[in-house]
Amino acid sequence: MITPLDDFLAAAVRTATPLALAALGECITERSGVINIGLEGAIICGAFAATVTAGAVGGSSGVAAGFAAGAVAGVLVTLLFMLFTVYLRADQIITGTAITLFALGLTGLLYKTVYGTTGVGLTIPTTGELPIPGLSQLPVVGRAFFAQPLVTYGLYLVVPLLAWWFARTHAGLALRATGESPDAALAAGVQPRRVQALAVLTGGAFAGVAGATLVLAQSGTFVEGMSAGKGFIAIAIVVLGRWSPIGVAGAALLFGGASALQYLFQSLGWREVPYQLFLALPYVLTLLVLARASARAQAPAALARRELTLG
Amino acid sequence: MTATPTSSVLAANVGREGRGALGQVAQVATLVAITMGLLVLLLAVTGYDPATALRALARGAFGSWYAFTSATLVRAIPLALTGLAVALAFRAGLLNIGAEGQLLAGATATAAVLGASGAVPPLLSLPLALAAGMAAGALWAGIAALLRQRFGVLEVISTIMLNFVALYAVGWLVRGPLQEPTRIYPQSASLAKALQLPVLLPGTRLHLGVLLAVSLAVALWWWQRATAGGFRLRAVGMNPHAAATIGRVDVARVSLLAFLASGALAGLGGAVELTGVTYALYENLSPGYGYTAIAVALLARLNPVGVLGTAVLFGALQAGANAMQRDAGVPIALVNVVEAVLILLVIASDRLRGTRAEATA
């Protein structure tokens, strides 16, 4: 028997998935010393590319193609951000804001151009839940964690892998060194510019997949501005998760839970509480979390620094 | 403490002074020309006829006296007020991206005050309502200012989050406490004629707000150039560390006041839009004026008088875009792309020139 709590937990994990993806990508980017406020732009571009591609290809291969297209679109729009910030050394915050506005406008324009005023037909293939036999039968956590789309299971692999990669590999060390002290990294034979370029683009790919997830694993359609601030929430998640992949995954779950609260209260019949309160909750939570976590957070020392090296 | 990145570089670069006014106008003209080129390209690529679309754009923005005053200039008013808000904050090194939320807060407070004003004579209640709008904008910005100073929260993120919260708050208010008496439409009651801002030119929709925007712009320009307070603001924006150690400026105080003043300007934008154009509060009151304001401020190089010019430019672009959608079927979103491209061009041109200057120094 499925209880309201089961529904709530499943919804929490489902809404946490794209947030976790975008935040993990941003985690990689920020560890290299770059803060990508344009994350929101990469998410919406990923969502749009996934919609168009999945619709055009169709079928289950359409879903795979949609995810791939989302990643590519995320990388492409982030490439613009990367050229401005890593190579022109322009202000990261203001460039990121411009990229977000650019991406929101562009996807809105292309959406109307491709689909006209009628909107997307309901022909986009989506990925259904894939319950894992046995595990999904576990009490409380079973359905929440083991009856989800494939992309959520992907996270179960990516999170520990990334933690290991940061801590134990040479490339991970080079990334962290670039974010903490580009000068020291340079002296040790690392090329900070190249590291930052790769880290930023990888973050873009993650955000693009997050956008694809919004469409292919959740809403099944594209809506203008559907990223709705998730890129900015993801940046808050990175702060709360203290720039560690496992912390980021946990923080994303918290935000997924906050977004899913509305379903819980709906099923409990709490109709007198205005639904706008639940819609606003993730944004208020972001503010509270940042207020609590920012003051004592240990950000990469060279984060958002414009001058890359002293030399 | 999380990185509160020094946006001083922004004030130093984007708000660069010392170039002649003529040179600045020439540079803006170049950027606009490039943008128009991009616009034509974008239209052609997305399959619209550029000639038809641009004709509609020009007609919608400048085609007649009515179009210019009632479409272009009426849109330029909230753009100028929010543009001044963004320019003031950026000048102090504060990246206030929340003009949209502060505008909504201002419009909400104005609607609430006017809704409750009852028997108070309009000559008193209207200024009171505009002041309430400014206070509400300042208060909404004050949350972000507090979060920044007490907890080191990046103001870009907090102001964006507050934009969403403001939007949902308005959504609730116009279906709850502030809903019109019949309780059918999600909006507040329409303002009585006496509570509306007077129309300035008979036969048009141009309202008194335009005088407010122009006089505030001139006052801010003078204040920044000629007063000690203006100098402190610019000093903090250029280099807060130097301002504190050499100039003995209370950086926290200057930042807080600048953030509050920025919010008040944006709040006034909302108050003026409500009393001069929409006459009621509803969710889609602003078509993103607070976001366009970023382009308005940056293209004006944060110069308050320049903001008036770029506000008219973007007002024309938005008025034209409406005609373009009606007559040529081109989506309005095109304007957002153009705005963002302009911002990126400003950043790129500054960086390229900056790098050249560094290389030759």
Image (cartoon, rainbow, N blue to C red):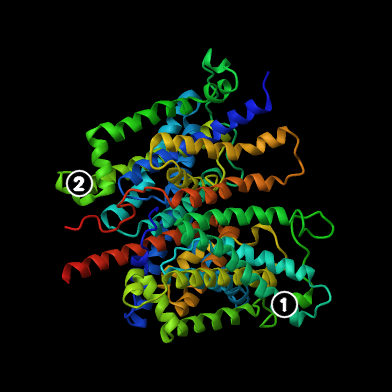
Disc 2 crowd rating (10 Å Cα; few below 14, some 14-19, many 20+) is many
- The span from disc 2 to disc 1 (Cα, nearest Å) is 61 Å
Q: Position of residue B308 (x, y in %)?
A: 50, 77
Quadrant position of the C terminus of chain A in the picture: bottom left
Left or right of B129 in this view: A190: left
Foreground residue, A278 or B43?
Answer: A278
Q: Give the residue displayed 59% in from the left and 76% down from the top.
A: B64
How many numbered discs? 2
Q: Position of residue A78 (x, y in %)?
A: 37, 47
Residue at the spot of label 1: B126
Residue A271 found in image quarter:
top right
Q: Label for residue A263? A: none
Where B300 falls versus A115 (above or below)? below
- The residue type indicated by label 2 comes to Ala
Left or right of A105 in this view: B179: right
Read off the chain for label 2: A
- Residue A52 visible at all: no
Disc 1 crowd rating (10 Å Cα; few below 14, some 14-19, many 20+) is many
Label 2 vs label 1, nearer the camera? 2
Foreground residue, B176 or B29?
Answer: B176
Q: Give the residue displayed 37% in from the left and 50% down from the top.
A: A35
